[in-house]
Image: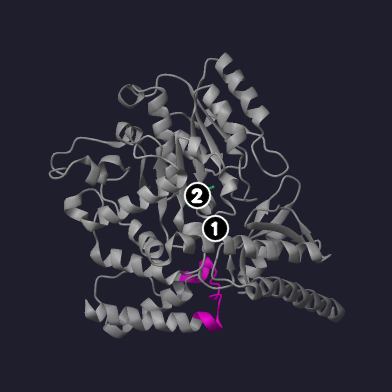
Amino acid sequence: MQKALNLFQRIASDLLEDEKKNPVSDYIPVQELYQQIDLALRENPISEQEFESVLREVVFASPRTATPAFFNQLFGGRNETAVLGELLSVLLNNSMYTYKAAGAAVGVEKAVLREVCNTIGWDSGSDGTFASGGSLTNFMAMIMARDTTLSDVKNRGMHAPMTVYTSEESHYSIPKNAAFCGIGRDQVRYISTDNYGRMIPEELERQIENDIQEGYIPTLLNLTAGTTVLGAFDSITDLLPIAKKYNIWTHVDGAYCGSVIFSHKYKHLIGGIKGVDSFSFNAHKMIGTPLTCSLLLVKNKASLYQSFSNEASYLYQTEGDEFNPGQTSLQCGRRNDALKFWALWKSVGTKGLEKIVDKQFALADEARAYVRNHPDYKLHSFDDSISICFSYKDFDAKTLCKELYEQNTLLVSYGEGKTKDFVRMVTINAQNESSDILDFFNSLEQFVQDKTSYQEKAKSIT
Ligand SMILES: *Cc1c(COP(=O)(O)O)cnc(C)c1O
C-alpha cells in the first residue's frame, strides 16, 4: 500500500503544480480519445513505468474542476479538509449498513444528520440518511410521499392514479423518479413559474383542484431551493399551506442551494423549512465537499423506516435499528459519504460553513455588478442567487460556451431562458476570489476579441 500511496503523492503533487499554470486541461475530441491515450485493456500486465505513465495521462487529461476556470457545473473547487476526509473513507472502506461494519463512521453520520435536523429546528423524532446523489434523495422523498399517501402501494403495487407537483424550472430527476416509483411521468404536473423562476401558488392550487376533480390523488409537492438554471427559490411560506390544505407531502429539493440553511444572512431563502416533510441538499455543491455528499432529512423518521427497512437476518445481527443505518437507506452496501462533510464541519465549525455559503453570494453579487455595469452585457438572472445568467453583445450563448471549451479557455455552460439562451456562470467555488471573477469576464472578452480580429483578418485576405 505504501508504494501506491507514494505514487498517488507524486501524481497528485504534479497535478496541483500543473493546475496553477494550466487551469484548463487540453480538450480532446472524443474521436481522438482512444488514439491519444492507450485506454484499452489487455490480457497481459504492463510494466510499472508504463502504468505510471498511462495513469498520469488520464489524470492530466481530465477536466479540472477545482481551478478558477471551471464555472460549468453546480460544483467546483477543492476543499482540502473535505478531501482529506474522503481519502480516509476510501482507505477505511467501511460500508454504512451496520454498526458492526462501520463502527465510528455510523456515529459520524448520525452526528451530521442530527446537527442538520437541529439547524432546521426539528426535534428528536426527525432523522435522515445519505444517498449517492440529489436525484436519489429526491427519489427517496417521492417514495415516502407515495407510501404515506397510500400505505399499501409498496405491497400491492400501484393501483391508484397519483400526481406530483413541481415547477417547470425544477430538476429532471422528478419525472425520472415518477417513472421509477410507478407514479408515471404523465402524472407529473409542471407548475408555471413567475419571472423570477418561482412556482406560482395560484397555479399550483388550480392544478390540484383540477386533478382531484378528475380522480387523481395528489401525492407530492416538490419545491426547489436553487433551480438549476436561474438559482431561484420557490417560496415555502406561500406554497406549503396549499400542500397542507390538501394533505400533500412536501419535499424541498435543495440539492443546489439548500446549504443556505447554514447562513444567517441567506437562510430566509428557505424560510418555512421547518414545516416541510423532507428536505435534501448536496454538500458537494455549495459546501464544496468532493462528490457525492447528498443528505436527506425527514421530519418524521418513521417514514424512513416505513419505506426503506427490510428484514435481513444475515445482515442485521447486532445493535438496534438506531445504529444500523441500512434500515433507512436506499442501498445495501453504501460508502461513507459523511466523513468528508463531518471532517470539514468539525474543523471549521458551523461558522465556517456559513462563511463558505456567504462567500458564494458575495462573489455572485460582484459578478452581477460587473454584468450590470458593462453595456456589452445583459443580465437574465436575479439577486439572491449564485447563478449569474447573461448574454454578451449578440453572441450566441451555445456557440460561445462550446468554443471557450474547445479552445481550452473556460468551462462554463449555457441555459435556455424563456425567450433567449444565455451563459450561466456559477460562483459555487468558495475558494475563488474577486480577481477570479474579473478574470472570468476578461478571458471571455479577450477570447471574443481575438476571435473577431482573426475572422476579420481572414476576410481581408480572401
Ligand atoms: C444537482 C441537482 C440535483 C441532482 O443532484 P445529483 O447529485 O447530481 O444527482 C437535483 N436537484 C437540483 C435542484 C440540482 O441542482
Residue pointed to by mark 1: 74
In space, the residues marked 1 and 2 are separated at their CA atoms by 9 Å
- Quadrant location of residue 291? bottom left
Could you tell me residue 57's position as x and y percent? 42, 78
In the rendering, which numbered label is found on residue 222? none
Task: Indicate yes or no: mark 1 CB to ligand 1 under 8 Å.
Answer: yes
Magenta region includes residue 21 = yes
Amino acid type, mark 2: Ala
Which residue is painted at 40% across and 61% down in the image? Answer: 345
Q: Is residue 430 left or right of residue 396?
A: left
Looking at the figure, which quarter contains the N terminus?
bottom left
Which residue is painted at 41% across and 45% down in the image? Answer: 117
**Magenta stretch, residue numbers:** 19-33
Task: Indicate yes or no: mark 2 CB to ligand 1 under 8 Å.
Answer: yes
Residue pointed to by mark 2: 255
Q: Is residue 395 visible?
A: no
Of 104 and 377, nearer the camera is: 104
The answer to the question of whether label 1 and label 2 lie on touching residues, with beta carbons closer than 8 A, is yes
